[in-house]
Amino acid sequence: MQRSLRLRAVLLTAACCIAANALAQSNWPEKPITMIVPFPPGGVADTVARPVAEALSRELGQSVIVENRAGAGGAVGIGFVARAPADGYTVLLSLSSISILPEADALLARKPAYQMSQLKPIARFTADPTVLVVRADAPWQTLAEFVADARRKPGTYNYGSSGNYGTMHVPMEMLKNAAGFRMTHIPYTGAGPAVVALLAGQVDAIASGPATVVQQIKAGKLRALAHWGDRPLAALPGVPSLEQSGFKVKFAQWSGLFVPAATPDDVVGKLRAASAKAAADRAVVQVIEKAGSPIAYLDAPEFESYWRSDAAVMIDAVRKIGKVE
């Protein structure tokens, strides 16, 4: 009898806990949400995050606060979200470098800041080809001139990036390998600082998402020589692709929303629904398109499939780059 009563008490307690958890989840969100951007302000991720956060705030009825946690090419912020409580109150707006960094850690024989399996994709918002950019006063008017000069003077010129193995480093290494030239890599803490370094004459070139550089190009301060895409860029008409120039190299700098992998399904569902509305929000579309980065929305299932396929290409590229200290 006593065992039966104890069992009933345990079951009743468990049922109450499950009911309480379900009720708590159904009321999500009950407090502000933090959106981690693992790069400094001024880069592609930050450009996408801020209008998306505003739209999510409207859809979810709670503030979505953007917090920049830069460092280690994005690994600091991504790792922070991967280890965060899986309650929906910490989300990540990251770039395609999320697929690269664990492989880079493996190459360097160090403990990974996170694993891809620790994160669950919610939505992809943009997918832009990287653009090769130089200063407007640079001597190169075309990609052919740039490559020829770099071949004649190996190691003389340098390029900036958002950090080792990041979305500005990997595509340049892919181009260098395909075109057969050498340049010195100068890593910065994010795309914004790399663009500032280019404008200041500290580096000779960068490979960046359009959103980071299109306004400087239109202002006549920078010049785009080529892009890593497979179709014309609406924001930069007339700029040729690398394939058109004879180099079979492609790279997309995409942005997407993630949560810790164990986040409850109902919270994930609400975030997916809110993200879909955010991607269609006129204000979001206008802000991101003005920055040169049109919406390329994918819902979670399609985004997850795309992410896995893209990650395989990125991991192969990192292995070809090899160990970089």
Image: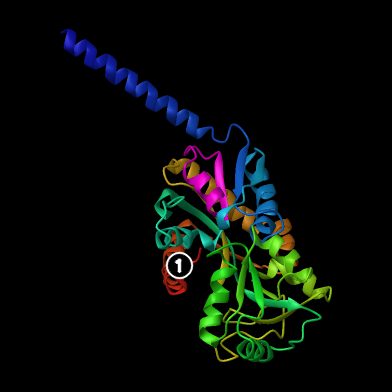
Percent from the top left, x then y, of residue 168?
A: 60, 68
Q: Nearer the viewer, residue 134 or 242?
A: 134
Q: How is the image coloured?
A: rainbow
Could you tell me if residue 315 is visible in this image? Answer: yes
Name the residue at 65% across, 61% down.
Answer: 188
For mark 1, what is the residue?
Answer: 323
Q: Which residues are magenta?
A: 74-93
Examine the image and state in which quarter residue 42 appears.
bottom right
Examine the image and state in which quarter residue 127 appears.
bottom right
Is residue 38 toward the left or the right of residue 287 in the image?
A: left
Q: Nearer the viewer, residue 256 or 185?
A: 185
Q: Residues within 10 Å of mark 1 (few under 14, many from 20)?
A: some
Name the residue at 71% across, 86% down.
Answer: 238
Q: Is residue 255 magenta?
A: no
Name the residue at 68% across, 44% down.
Answer: 58
Percent from the top left, x then y, of residue 36?
A: 60, 47
Mark 1: amino acid: Lys
Above or below for 61 versus 247: above
Examine the image and state in which quarter residue 46 appears.
bottom right
Q: Secondary structure at mark 1?
A: loop
Q: Residue furthest top?
A: 2
Above or below for 34 versus 141: above
Percent from the top left, x then y, of residue 66?
A: 66, 46
Q: Residue furthest right?
A: 219
Q: Nearer the viewer, residue 130 or 283?
A: 130
Percent from the top left, x then y, of residue 172?
A: 58, 75
Quadrant (top left/top right/bottom left/bottom right) for the N terminus: top left
Could you tell me if residue 269 is visible in this image? Answer: no
Q: Is residue 90 magenta?
A: yes
Is residue 2 toward the left or the right of residue 60 in the image?
A: left
